[in-house]
């Protein structure tokens, strides 16, 4: 469309983007609009339309999928979902599904107590996490079998040492989970404080605007009364001359 509203122009062009938002159709009508835009100081070139339309497209997809990503607790893992720019919607959904599966595997592994997250790669997939959990379980079973053997052979000191190590590892993992929960809570509280501060600031600005408007109204009322007094005085003066 021809016009001064660039935002609307970009919105109208979103449908001409490819499915990644990295290319845009640019036909003869677009060339005429580019020339017109140059006259009114607007960038309606192919690059300008691509940049403006892609921004709107990515923001719209982000409004839908960013909250889903933020609700996935990946702990020490690196998220597969890294925003919407340059991604098809199918790729975005696939990345979120992968992250959800990884988060579920991580939660299950931590719940069993067999997963040692220090051994996880930041990019570990759900299968790797479950495999490491199973490996940890087999290791615990091996230790239990060794403890039974040690008990039978009178190695009580070794059993107590192993029990202490296992207890220390379990406490360490519990502390890590608690630290992560505390970090999430701190983040939520910080967001709540920021929203409260922004709301208070908006309310304060509204109050200042209302006070300023009331002051302007009072000044206008005084001005109107003064004018009416002058008009009334002139009227009385005219009546006096008439007499």
Image (cartoon, rainbow, N blue to C red):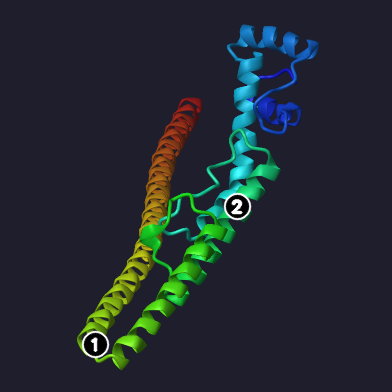
Closer to us: mark 2 or mark 1? 1
Q: Is residue 147 left or right of residue 127?
A: left
Quarter containing the N terminus? top right
Residue extending farthest left? 157
Residue closer to the observer: 136 or 46: 136
Rendered residue at 56%/49% (across/down): 66
Q: CA distance from mark 2 to mark 1?
A: 50 Å
* Callout 2: SS: helix
Residue 27 vertical placement versus 128 (above, below): above
Which residue is tagged 2?
96
Label 2 vs 1, first from the N-terminus: 2
Front residue of this view, candidates 20 and 211: 20
Query: Residue at 43% across / 79% down in the picture?
Result: 141
Q: Which residue is mark 1?
A: 155
In the rendered view, does 216 fall on the left or right side of 242? left
In this view, the residue in front, 65 or 38, is 65
User: Residue at horizontal 72%, vertical 33%?
Assistant: 19
Q: How crowded is the residue under tag 2: few (<14 C-alpha within 10 Å), some, or many (20+)?
A: many
Residue 179 place in picture, x, y as percent: 32, 66
Disc 1: CA contacts within 10 A as few (<14), some (14-19) or many (>=20): few
């Amino acid at each position: 469309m021809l016009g001064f509203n660039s935002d609307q122009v970009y919105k109208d062009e979103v449908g001409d983007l490819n499915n990644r938002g990295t290319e845009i159709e640019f036909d003869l009508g677009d060339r005429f609009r580019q020339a017109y835009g140059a006259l009114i100081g607007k960038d309606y070139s192919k690059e300008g339309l691509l940049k403006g339309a892609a921004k709107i497209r990515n923001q719209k997809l982000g409004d839908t999928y960013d909250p889903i990503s933020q609700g996935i607790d990946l702990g020490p893992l690196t998220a597969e979902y890294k925003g919407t720019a340059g991604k098809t919607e199918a790729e975005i959904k696939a990345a979120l599904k992968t992250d959800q599966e990884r988060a579920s595997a991580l939660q299950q592994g931590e719940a069993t107590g067999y997963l040692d997250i220090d051994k996880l790669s930041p990019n570990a997939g759900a299968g790797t996490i479950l495999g490491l959990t199973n490996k940890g379980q087999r290791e615990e079973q091996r230790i239990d079998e060794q403890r039974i053997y040690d008990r039978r052979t009178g190695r009580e000191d070794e059993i107590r040492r192993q029990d202490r190590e296992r207890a220390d590892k379990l406490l360490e993992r519990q502390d890590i989970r608690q630290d992560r929960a505390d970090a999430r809570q701190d983040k939520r509280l910080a967001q709540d404080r920021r929203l409260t501060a922004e709301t208070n600031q908006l309310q304060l600005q509204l109050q200042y605007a209302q006070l300023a408007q009331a002051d302007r109204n009072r000044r206008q009322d005084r001005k109107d009364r003064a004018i009416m007094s002058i008009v009334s005085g002139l009227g009385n003066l005219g009546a006096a001359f008439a007499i």
